[in-house]
Amino acid sequence: MEKNLQAIVDHTETILSSISTRPEWEQSKASILGPNGSLTQVAKGIGSLSKEERPVFGQSLNQAKRQIESLFQSTLTKIDQHADLASLGKKFDHTLPASPNHIGGTHPLTNVRRKVVSIFRKIGFTVAEATEVETEWYCFDALNTPQDHPARDAQDTLFFPETSVWSNVSKKSKEKNILRTHTSSVQIRTLLKEPPPLRIIAPGRCFRRDTVDATHSANFHQTEGLYVDKNVNVRDLKGVLDFFLRELFGEKLETRLRPSFFPFTEPSYEVDLKAPNLGKLSDRWIEIMGCGMVDPEVLKLVELCPDKWSGFAFGIGLERISMILHGIDDIRHFYQNDQRFLSQFSNAL
Ligand code: DAH
């Protein structure tokens, strides 16, 4: 009988070594410890033993039972652990390369704006802002733009319906609301608010009814600049712009003022630049911005006496700066949110 007990323990070890699921485990347990199990059958044989043999056999039986139960228990623990691991999926491979860490960057136009602002800050200019929704008076009339000027045409300017209300955009009288076509309107809002002398730049978004192509966009960004003081002259204008453009494009830059026309400046100029470090555009004269001496008519319209005050103004496209600096050939890239483009230029400059 004792031998039988040992045989059952050995048998238990053998079958437990080959099972891996709970149902198999249940089945094996029933086949040994269940009512018809092999151990139960052997235990029943106790009845045929003598009085003296019974306690000895009883002891061996209990010992074998404990051993078998502990074998079952440890196997069950293993099966459960296995099931847990399996539910976690495939084993993690520590040797795989890490997935790329996408950290957001600033938009290329934000970089240009910040750079422009930081350059002008060095020479005492502060940032002025106004709304993108404007009125005809601030965008055109106060800037000495005649009623029949083509820029005012509905084909160039985006007009709001007469019924639309913009409570944060003050009007001169009953003129129409529009989306500003340039940041020059900020000159007017600032001059009406702050007495000169003043030095401001006004970076911001502008809108025109342009057909979109590689060099035109219905929305784009400019920085306006304005300096009003006593005895301001063209040399001041040229000095400030040369400083600005050299900080931006490098010391080897050449610039020239070419006569032009804007209703709000007299005289007016286009600024051209030539630099050796601009890729395809190197060593060629490129038009970069408009500027001029503030027209006395503009000063009168904001109630400043032109005999006492004078000034210069300029306007430059932020997209244009970025395109020239980085050899970008299509303005639409700036608005398409293509990560391949953005990540190339996000931290450049
Ligand atoms: N407002 C002009 C434009 O949108 C740019 C400009 C030219 C601004 C000359 C000025 C200026 O202040 O003096 O094209």
Image: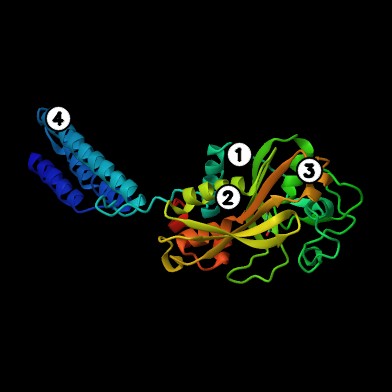
Amino acid on which the number 4 mark rests in the picture: Gln
Residue 253: where, in percent of width, then height?
Answer: 46, 56
Q: Name the residue under label 4.
A: 59
Residue 168: where, in percent of width, then height?
Answer: 80, 43
Q: Mark 3 points at which residue?
A: 306
Sequence-wise, the earlier of marks 4 and 1 is 4
Sequence-wise, the earlier of marks 1 and 3 is 1
Does mark 4 have its CB less than 8 Å from ligand 1? no
Determine crowd level at label 2: few under 14, some 14-19, many 20+ residues with C-alpha closer than 10 A. some
Sequence-wise, the earlier of marks 4 and 3 is 4
Q: Is residue 136 visible?
A: yes
Q: Quadrant location of the N terminus? A: top left
Does mark 1 have its CB less than 8 Å from ligand 1? no
Q: Mark 2 points at which residue?
A: 238
Residue closest to the far left: 3
| SS at circle 1 | loop
In three-dimensional space, the C-alpha distance between marks 1 and 3, rounded to whole angstroms, equals 22 Å
**Front-most of 220 and 251?**
251
Amino acid on which the number 1 mark rests in the picture: Phe
